[in-house]
Amino acid sequence: MDMVVCVKRVPDTAESEVHIDSSGRDIDKGRLSFGINEADNYAVEEAIQIKERDGGTVTVISLGGKESDEQIRMALAKGGDEAVRLEDPAFAGSDGLAIAKALAAAVKDLKYDIIFTGALADDDAFGAVGVAMAELLGVNHAAYVKKVEIAGDKIKVGRELEGGLLEFVEMDLPAVLTIQTGINEPRYASFKGIKLAAKKEIELKSAADLGLDASEIGEAGAWAKLEKFTPPVVGEMAEILEGEPEETASRLAGILKEKGLV
C-alpha cells in the first residue's frame, strides 16, 4: 500500500492572544509557536498504522518554506519514508484550490493508493484542499473520515456526520481521504526515529518543477482572495428577562415589536 500524506505548518493560537498585523491581511506571528496541523497529525498516524499492518510506503508532502522541514522531519521520524517540500514565491496568496493544484501536480507522478490530508487546517479551516485534489486527480474521495478498512483494491471508510454518527462508504482505490481528529492516537517520535529522519533528504520542488504556470497558483490562480482581517464587532450584552412566564412573554413580544422583528 503506497500512501502520500500532506502536512501543513500552522501557528498555535489556542493559548495566545491573536493580533492582526500591519498589512491587515494576516495575523502577527512574531510571538507565536508553530507545529503540525492537528488533523494532519492524525493523518500521518493513520498512514503509518496502515504501513505497519499491511506494508507499503509513506511519502510526506508539504507546501511552505524551509521552516516546514521541522514538521516534515517529525512525520518522517514517526515512520515516513520519503519527503517532498514545495517552495516557490509564486505560491504566495494561494487559496485552497491553488494549494490543491500544487499538491496534485506533485502527487500525480508518484505511485500511490491513498492520499491523506487533514479534514481541516487549524489556521483557515476551509476543508477544501483534499476534496479539490481528488477532483483534479480524477480519483475518489471521502471527507471527515474516522474509520478506514482496506480490502484489496477497495476501501471502506466511516465518515463523521452531525451528532457523532458515521456514514460508511465503499469505493475503489486510489482515493483521497481527509482525516478527522480522533480517528487514532498519534504517537510520539522515538529518539532513534528523530536521528534517522535528520539524515533523510527532503526533495524540493518549485512551481516550474511541477509544470505549473504562475497564473495557476498564488493569488493569480486563487478563486478566493483575502481582502482583510477585522476584529469581531462587539455587540450589545444579552438582556435576561426574569419573572413569571406570562410577564416575560409579554415583555419579549414588546421588545420584538419595538425592534421591528414581528
Image: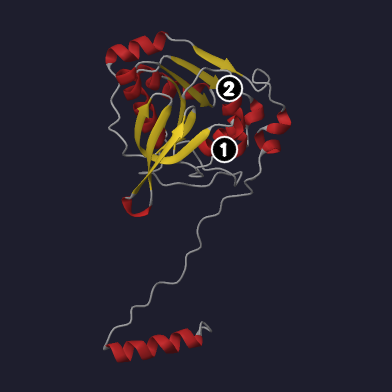
| Above/below status of 168 relative to 84 | below
* 208 to the left or right of 113: right
| Amino acid type of the residue that numbered disc 1 sits on in the rendered structure | Ala
Q: CA distance from mark 1 to mark 2?
A: 14 Å
- Mark 1–mark 2 CB contact (< 8 Å): no
Q: Position of residue 96 (x, y in %)?
A: 57, 39
Secondary structure at numbered mark 1:
helix
| Above/below status of 58 relative to 235 | above
The residue at the point 66 percent across, 43 percent down is: 223
The residue at the point 55 percent across, 34 percent down is: 134
Q: Earlier in the sequence, mark 1 or mark 2?
A: 2
The residue at the point 28 percent across, 15 percent down is: 191
| Amino acid type of the residue that numbered disc 2 sits on in the rendered structure | Ala
* 82 to the left or right of 15: right
Q: Position of residue 135 (x, y in %)?
A: 58, 36
| Residue at the disc numbered 1 | 132
* 252 to the left or right of 140: left
Circle 1 packing at 10 Å, graded few (<14), some (14-19), many (20+), is many
Residue 189's disc number: none
Secondary structure at numbered mark 2:
helix
Q: Nearer the viewer, residue 204 or 115?
A: 115
| Residue at the disc numbered 2 | 106
